[in-house]
Amino acid sequence: MPRKPTYDRDALIAKARDIFWRHGWAGTSLKDLERELKLNPGSIYAAFGSKDALYALALKRYAQDGVANIRALSQELGPLGALKAQPRLVVEASGLPTKACMLSKTYAELQARNHDLADQARAHMVEMKSCFADLFRSAQAAGEIGPEHDPDRLAARYQSDLLGLRLSAERDDVNASEIAVDIADDLDRL
């Protein structure tokens, strides 16, 4: 009879997410994962099937957490308030493996290889953009944004701004906090 695993699967996925987020797909070996997750050799395959399968779960967790966080922020601050607060939160976030977006890092790293994980990262970015569009629609319905604006176009621009901000926050020659304020202020002009 097979032994029941003694690890917390969700905790391992969260930890793997942080490792992959920091080092990327190519920069993370199975040995790295075994060491950091404290798994015996071969346990990655036994628990998750493959490095790619674990990476896919980590991407999914990252995306789900992102959507859940912005929705919770919207419940607290309203849709426009959440959209305005997000850039500052991105810059001020501490304890993250990196400020750059895991989805965009994955897409940039793997799309040239035609790797399935790039397609998955893209799909998660589309989902996130849809979440932003929903917030813009809600803000528009509340009269906080003019009716002449296309929420889908606003969401695409906003996501692009956030992705650039997250990358800029990694640089020491850019004042990302000022850029975050500018992004938020631009939303007041809609």
Image (cartoon, grey):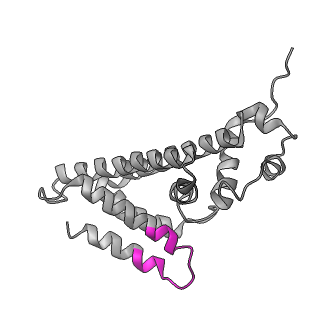
Q: Which residues are magenta?
A: 164-179
- What residue is drawn where x is 23% and y is 49%? 137
The C terminus lies in which quarter of the figure?
A: bottom left
Task: Count the marks.
Answer: 0
Q: Is residue 61 left or right of residue 14?
A: left
- What residue is drawn where x is 40% and y is 45%? 127
- What residue is drawn where x is 81% and y is 23%? 4
Foreground: 121 or 8?
121
Instruction: Assess whether residue 43 is covered by the magenta stretch.
Output: no
- What residue is drawn where x is 71% and y is 38%? 50
Taking the view exactly as shown, the residue that stands out farthest to the bottom is: 173
Q: Position of residue 116 (x, y in %)?
A: 55, 43
The N terminus lies in which quarter of the figure?
A: top right
Q: Is residue 162 left or right of residue 92?
A: left
Taking the view exactly as shown, the residue that stands out farthest to the left is: 148
Q: Position of residue 58 (x, y in %)?
A: 61, 45
Q: Position of residue 59 (x, y in %)?
A: 57, 46
Q: Is residue 8 left or right of residue 75?
A: right
Q: Is residue 7 left or right of residue 144?
A: right
Is 176 situated above or below 132?
Answer: below
Foreground: 75 or 15?
15
Q: Position of residue 3 (x, y in %)?
A: 85, 22
Taking the view exactly as shown, the residue that stands out farthest to the top is: 1
